[in-house]
Amino acid sequence: MDGQTDSARGDWGPFGRPLFEDPQARRLSRVGVVDIGSNSVRLVVFDGAARSPAYFYNEKIMCALGAGMPETGRLNPEGKARALSALARFQTLARGMELPPLTAVATAAMREAEDGPAFRAEIEEKTGLRIWVIDGEEEARLSAQGVLLGWPGADGLVCDIGGSSMELAQVKGGQIGRRVTSALGPLRFKDLDGGAKAREKYIRKAVKALSDKLETTGDRLFLVGGSWRALARIDMERQGYPLHVLHEYRMSVDSVLETVKFIEKSDPEELRAKCSLSSARMSLVPYASEVLREVLSAFKPSEIAISSYGIREGLLYEQMPQQLRDRDPLIEACRFAEAKDARLPGFGKKLYRFVLPLFEDAGEARLRIVKAACLLHDVSWRAHPDYRAETCFDNATRANLGGLDHSERVFLGLALLHRYKNKREGTRFEDFYGLLDPAEQQKAEVLGKAMRFGSMLWMSDASQDGASLAWDGEARKLTLSLTDAASPLFGEVADARLKSLAAALDAAEVQVVLEN
């Protein structure tokens, strides 16, 4: 065992060196942001690998600052009191965590209310928190940056709905294009005189104005905001979808429209309880659904994806140097996890080289998942051996990771499960396996069993690869080559694991070659 980290050992070739220990990245190792919205006030503290951070602390208060504003033009008095109390608490928490000054932004309610400037001044006087009141286009830009935090190089249309407004931003190749804002937050129109027909007319007119300003490309639609996430959770419930991770959850237009109908026909309280939604959030979902139906009709997206990353993550992205923005969020997070939790930080690099011959025909998208698995193969070693395999699967599928869709989560989880366990049957995760076809399940098993075998071949010399694999797919022949120094590592257990890998590959022949 060498115990060295990758940063001391050169480059990964096309993957590059990890940046989480770079001074510019370390500056972002713990950052607190506050989002003062029309419906909620939230503090998020990010921590860890800056490109794909963990949520060190996350607290939300449903203040409904924008409730009643269409009639009064002023902030909700009860909401102001709750918001002021929450912000005082957030400042105290930040001091206790020894954070840099909080970055605080306020959106539609604060920027449009008659008493918004006075309330901003009151907050600053009583809490010391400086607030940045942003306009709609800036709100759209920050939300789009949040999407780019999780989807580098994203193409499509970002749609962020809040309590009092809805913003759209075009993204292409990781760059933010045109941005527009509208008064389509549910608090704006839910109580219109005339009921459903008046709302339909209001929404259609507002969406038409948006579509006149933005090109309709038929690209992916990224949905940002609590109401959209609640709708996606209901879509999961309607379809019996097993993996309740909202980030990168994909929906078709037809599926969304079916869910909108489902919401209209369902008892709101019963649906709220089944989906674990707050009453305040559930009360806005039917109105947000009406907006989404019109947005889909106007912009005709090819696919719909939920982004849990929005304005708060966009504020973090705003502080990143370009070098850090360009990194793969999945790989950076996995490398951080290996450096922090693995018994042998840096061995993932050697393991990746070891298993790579089994994936010579794999594309770049699959190889990044192979690499992520190798980096994570040992981070759960502290779990009880009887539960280690399931812990690995659970962590991979439910972890807060960007740049990973649901099928990739399950592939990664299944590979890590097989890192510690030969059979996948009989676990509590069998419903998840259906997100992969049988061929993909088999490839995940091969990766897991290759890591399970390769993890037994630790060498004390970090510069030396004592073992290598070769796979001839046509002849179905698996070859293990061992140096003299590594040959003592190939004991009975290692031999059994090699045979298990060969069975997963459906190998006709297994050869062990000793090299001088």
Image (cartoon, helix red, strand yellow):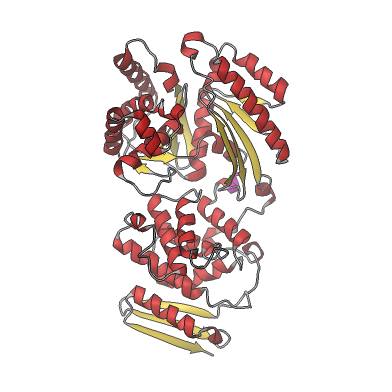
Residue 277 in sight in this render: yes
Q: In front: 173, or 498?
A: 498
- Along the line of sight, which residue is nearer the eye, 59 or 119? 59
Q: Nearer the viewer, residue 319 or 31?
A: 31
The prevailing secondary structure element of the residues shown in magenta is helix
Q: Residue at x 48, y 14 (%)?
A: 68
Corner quadrant of residue 195: top left
Q: Position of residue 516 (x, y in %)?
A: 54, 90
Judged left or right of residue 231, residue 54 is: right
Residue 402 horizontal side relative to residue 22, left or right:
left
- Relative placement, left or right, of 381 versus 25 is left
Q: Is residue 191 above or below residue 467?
A: above
Image quadrant occupied by the N terminus:
bottom right
Asked if residue 214 is positioned above or below residue 93 in the image, the reply reads above
Q: Indicate whether 393 appears above or below 120.
A: below
Q: Which residues are magenta?
A: 320-324
Is residue 184 in view? no
Locate residue 466, reporting x and y percent: 55, 80
- Identify which residue, 99 or 402, lies in the foreground: 99
Residue drawn at point x = 40 percent, y = 71 percent: 422
Side of 436 where 183 appears, left or right? right
Residue 337 image-quadrant placement = bottom right
- Percent position of residue 240, x then y: 31, 45
Residue 493 is situated, as x and y percent measured from the top left of the image, at: 48, 81
Is residue 202 a member of the stretch shown in magenta?
no
Numbered label tally: 0
Q: In the rendered image, which quarter is residue 55 located in?
A: top right
Q: Residue furthest bottom?
A: 516
